Amino acid sequence: MTATVAIGEFARLSHLSVKTLRYYHDIGLLAPAEIDPRSGYRRYRTDQVEQALLIRRLRLLDMPLPEIEDVLTAPGIAARDAALRAHLERMEEQLQRTRTVVASLRALLTPASPLDIEYRALPSTRVLAVREVVAKPDIDRWCAAAYPRIYAAIARSGSAPAGPAGATYPLDYFADDAAEVLAYVPVPRGEAIPAAAGLELVELPAHRAAIALHRGSFDEIDRTYGALGTHVAEHDRALSEPVREIYLAGPGDTADPADYRTEICWPVL
């Protein structure tokens, strides 16, 4: 049998403070079953305890209140469970991100090994590319979508890549956190590559570059950028052309980020 209890007793049943219960009532998240018209005292039904406990757990998982409301008002169990799963997946991603940053901070406490830097004349290169303005937080997702499109177009043409994939990043990408990025795969000269939506044939210009090899995940690539850029600032004259990354081994080649190998090519005179 369902009973009604005063707000103080409901706080004990639900482990939500009276202040919190009043706030949830004010924002329409958890309304009391009854409100005395003269005293304003709130009373709750005992069958609201389960809902209150669910809200409490979701807040412990840092779910925003609007999303909790979506869970509570979901049209059915399937919709409710889908909303819960989506939040748990976001939390797992954030947890992994936190672990990665913690590992990176620990690495910063260890002196970095001297960086091997070589100078190379990068030749003019014909590439099939995707060009788009991309924000830094979106770059991983964007690249994950761009390269399969490029490789698929090359395969449809009956040709084959003429070298490892790469990307160019202009100064604005680092200064403004968003700019036009070019993701590319080299293609043979003299072979016809049919045009495809969103893809273009581009001639990357030849230039001289200071080059360092970054080993490991892209989460740590800023350390290599810092060391290479410092070397260039102290010993060379940097050009304003985009920095080029060449992916000798990446997500498409190995499942272990520790095995990634990326050449960072800093244009210099």
Image: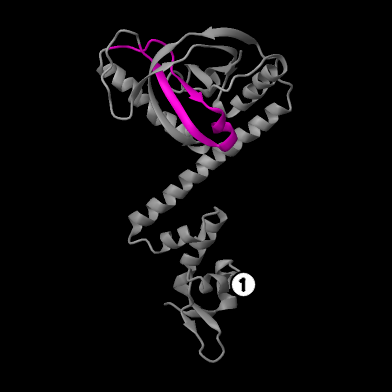
On whether residue 184 falls in the magenta region, the answer is yes
Residue 79 left/right relative to 20: left
- Position in image of residue 88 (x %, y %): 47, 47
Residue extending farthest bottom: 38
- Left/right of residue 68 with respect to residue 157 in the rendered view: right
| Residue 127 x, y percent position in the rendering | 39, 16
Q: Does residue 192 show up magenta in the picture?
A: no
Which of the two residues, 109 or 121, is positioned nearer the viewer here? 121
Which image quadrant for residue 252?
A: top left
Which image quadrant: the N terminus? Answer: bottom left
Q: Amino acid at mark 1?
A: Lys
Bounds of the magenta span? 159-187
Q: Is residue 81 above or below residue 226?
A: below
Quarter of the image with the C terminus in it: top right
Q: Position of residue 245 (x, y in %)?
A: 52, 20
Residue 169 to residue 30: above or below: above
Q: Position of residue 129 (x, y in %)?
A: 38, 23
Residue 126: quadrant of the picture: top left
Q: Residue at the location (55% across, 67% down)?
A: 14
On the picture, is 166 further left or further right than 15? left
> Which residue is at 61% across, 72% downward?
19
Residue 8 against residue 225 in the figure, above or below: below
Residue occupying image coordinates x 71% and y 14%: 235
**Residue indicated by mark 1:** 19
